[in-house]
Structure formats: C-alpha cells, structure tokens
C-alpha cells in the first residue's frame, strides 16, 4: 500500500493540470457530500427530537390528567379530547375491529358496518407494576362479559389495592365495574378510591354503558386507566373512555377523567391518609345514630341498617356535635 501511494504521489507531481482538476472535483464532491450529510444529520436529530417532543406532549397530557388537571375544580369529572373517544391500537385489534378514523368495521365488512358475530368480546387487565399499582384495563364489553342478571357480586375485601389505608374511608373501586365485567376480586381491576370517585365520578358512565348493552345487545369498546402522579400509590383519577361498536358510537360515546377526591378533604396520595378540612368537619350532614349503643353511622352503612327501629334515629348534625354528646363513630363506616 505505501508503495502504491508513493507511486501515485509521484505520478501526481509529474503532470500538474489533470490532478489539479481532479483535486477540485474531489473537493467539490467532498463539500457536496459534507453539506448533504450535515443537512441530513441536522435533520434527523430534529426529527427524533420532534417525535420525542410529541411523546412527551402525549405523556404530559396524560400526566396533566393525573397532575395538573387533577386540581379538582368542583366537578366530579371533566371531558378529555373534547369528549371524543380514543383507544390504543391493541384495544381495537383484540376486539377484531378494523378502524379507519371514526368508522369501524369487522373483517370482510364495509367500513362502518360491524358484524357482532365477528367481534371478539374480551377484557384485559394490566399486571400490577413495580409499586403494586393497577394499570390500564380495557375490553370489548358485551353481554358475554357481564354477570348473569340474577348474579350477586362476591366479596372483594381480601384485596388491598396500592395505597390502601385503614380507617380513611377508602373504597375498593373497580376499574371496569362488576356490572360490566363480572370481575369480583381481580387485583388488576381494583384501586383505592373515594366514595365520590366511585359514585359521583365513574358510576354514571358505568350505568350508561350497562344500560346501553342491555337494551341493544351491542358491544362497547371500553377503557379505564388509573392516572398516577409520579410514584404515588393512589391514583389522582381515572381516565374512562367508551364507545359503542355496532352503531359506530351513535348510542354511546364518552372520554372523561374522573377525580379521585373527596370534596372538603385533603388526600395524601402516597400514604392514603385523608385529612378532613376544618370546614367539612364543621358541616352538618345526615347521620344514623344508635341511641342505645351510642354509635353513629353514615346512612349507607350496613351497620346503620341493622339498628332496630326502637334505637335508630336519623339526625342532621356535625361530627363534633355528636362526639361531644358522647357518640362514637362506627368502626366500619368511619363517619
Ligand atoms: Zn357504620
């Protein structure tokens, strides 16, 4: 090789014009190449950072739901994406659905026509993460996934979802309601939630979905995702999305974020400790008292329903008024 180079050099020195032109050409080509590759290199990282930015944007939007948006604004839920349902691809795929924008179809059908017989009804629950938290749950729900009409929900008290703390009025909250999934104590489907999240936030959408399925026999693509802020153990809220399948969203369509809060209370989403604000402690509300045992309950408590007529009384009072009269809060409903 060195011999060759040497001889080339030698040749170059001999005739001057040809090599000078060749050198110029080489320089031109090199400059063009450098410019081109620089341009491309400059472009491709930009593209990468663009897509990273987009991913970040998406996750910010989601964290926004769990973080910024979770700043409870007095309403039990807020609309997401203008209320228009959106699902990850696998949610459609597992249902054997092919989608084109807003229109869905089953295999071999025209766009906008769904054949119930070709649909796959299913439920999916994420495995718990490293912190023991539930992840997204979704499915193509229909009568196949629902409990029998006369079925009764089983016991779920054995499950202690992430962040569960005793005596703080937490409820076990199904991501996909039992009435839709017939799932009782599936730990991938139960999160630590407030009564407010359960009944004021999620329940209306669950009931709407259930009613729709019972009345039409159709299916609903459905997703419920607990949204956490950082490594907190209790979700700030649940992102719920639903859309009826056979009628392409005509009968049912929602995209919503339900707050995991209790109005008037402060929640530590890491420890599950709930602090009732001064104001809420002073607010009078309806309790059921047992005049004999001197225990007071929330009206919804089973213990309250078991009190004999003779000893039972409904009172509107503050907690302080009751405790100052010697009444003790029930150990089960923790009023
Ligand atoms: Zn009670």
Image (tube, rainbow, N blue to C red):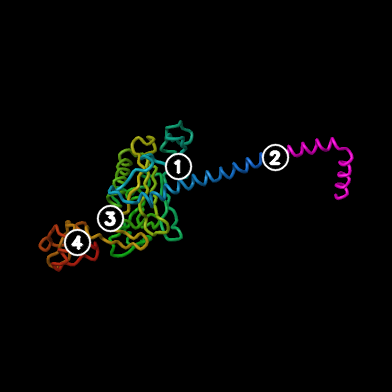
Which numbered mark, 4 or 1, is in the foreground of this view? 4
Residue 149 x, y percent position in the rendering: 29, 47
Is any atom of residue 186 visible in this view? yes
Which numbered mark, 2 or 1, is in the foreground of this view? 2
Q: CA distance from mark 2 to mark 4?
A: 80 Å
Q: With respect to residue 195, does 142 lie above or below? A: above
Q: CA distance from mark 2 to mark 3?
A: 64 Å
Residue beneath disc 1: 92
Quadrant of the image occupied by residue 318: bottom left
Instruction: Give the number of callouts.
Output: 4
* Ligand 1 placement by image quarter: bottom left
Q: Residue 304 in magenta?
A: no
Residue shown at the point (22%, 61%) measured from the top left: 335
The answer to whether the residue labelled 2 contacts the one labelled 4, judged by CB atoms less than 8 Å apart, is: no
Residue shown at the point (39%, 58%) measured from the top left: 187
Does any atom of ligand 1 lie closer than 8 Å to the CB of label 4? yes
Residue 238 x, y percent position in the rendering: 36, 50
Q: CA distance from mark 4 to mark 3?
A: 18 Å
In terms of secondary structure, where does tag 1 sit?
helix
Residue beneath disc 2: 33
First reached walking from the N terminus: tag 2 or tag 1? 2
Q: CA distance from mark 2 to mark 1?
A: 46 Å
């Amino acid at each position: 090789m060195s011999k060759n180079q040497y001889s080339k050099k030698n040749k170059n020195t001999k005739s001057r014009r040809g090599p000078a032109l060749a050198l110029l050409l080489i320089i031109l080509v090199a400059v063009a190449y450098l410019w081109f590759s620089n341009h491309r290199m400059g472009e491709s990282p930009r593209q990468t950072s663009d897509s990273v930015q987009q991913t970040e944007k998406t996750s910010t939007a989601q964290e926004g739901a769990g973080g910024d948006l979770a700043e409870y604004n007095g309403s039990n839920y807020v609309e997401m994406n203008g209320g228009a349902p959106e699902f990850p691809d696998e949610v459609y795929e597992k249902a054997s659905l092919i989608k084109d924008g807003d229109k869905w179809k089953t295999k071999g059908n025209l766009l906008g026509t769904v054949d119930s017989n070709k649909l796959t009804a299913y439920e999916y629950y994420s495995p718990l993460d490293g912190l023991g938290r539930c992840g997204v749950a979704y499915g193509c729900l229909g009568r196949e996934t629902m409990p029998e009409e006369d079925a009764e929900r089983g016991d779920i008290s054995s499950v202690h979802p992430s962040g569960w703390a005793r005596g703080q009025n937490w409820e076990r909250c199904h991501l996909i309601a039992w009435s839709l999934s017939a799932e009782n104590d599936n730990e991938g489907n139960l999160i630590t939630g407030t009564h407010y999240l359960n009944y004021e936030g999620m329940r209306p959408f669950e009931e709407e979905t259930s009613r729709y399925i019972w009345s039409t026999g159709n299916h609903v693509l459905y997703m419920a995702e607990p949204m956490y802020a950082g490594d907190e153990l209790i979700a700030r809220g649940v992102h719920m999305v639903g859309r009826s399948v056979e009628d392409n969203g005509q009968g049912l369509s929602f995209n919503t974020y339900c707050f995991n809060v209790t109005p008037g209370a402060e929640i530590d989403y890491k420890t599950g400790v709930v602090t009732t604000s001064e104001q809420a402690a002073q607010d009078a509300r309806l309790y059921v008292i047992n005049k004999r045992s001197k225990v007071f309950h929330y009206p919804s408590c089973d213990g309250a329903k078991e009190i004999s007529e003779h000893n039972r009384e409904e009172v509107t009072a503050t907690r302080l008024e009751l405790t100052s009269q010697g009444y003790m809060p029930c150990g089960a409903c923790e009023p």
